[in-house]
Amino acid sequence: MAKANRPHFHIWLQAKGGKIFYKLAKGYHTRQAAGQAGKRRQPDPEKRMVIQCDREECRPKL
């Protein structure tokens, strides 16, 4: 039986050099929760983004 994979979201932060973004390992169930956590970690909206992920391996635990 296949598991249903709910989409989840990751925070991506800009590296100090300003050229690349890196993904934080923790996944969030909603875009809003990821956005709030991203604001706490990096207040500048130009240096963070939230992207949806469908990978089964990194989904958050229910």
Image: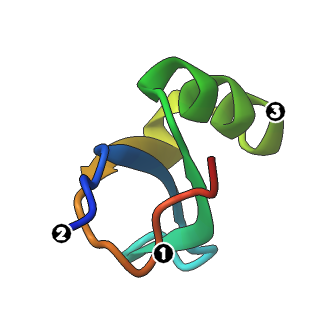
Neighbor class of circle 1 (other Cα within 10 Å; few <14, some 14-19, many 20+) is few
Q: Earlier in the sequence, mark 3 or mark 2?
A: 2
At x 51% / y 63%, what residue is drawn? 14
What residue is pinned by disc 1? Answer: 22
Q: Earlier in the sequence, mark 2 or mark 1?
A: 2
At x 61% / y 25%, what residue is drawn? 33
Amino acid type, mark 2: Ala
At x 29% / y 44%, what residue is drawn? 7
Which disc number belongs to residue 40? 3
Amino acid type, mark 1: Tyr
Amino acid type, mark 3: Arg
Q: For the N terminus, which image quadrant?
A: bottom left
Front disc: 2 or 1:
2
Task: Report x, y in % for residue 22.
Answer: 48, 75
What residue is pinned by disc 2? Answer: 2
Helix, strand or loop under label 2: loop
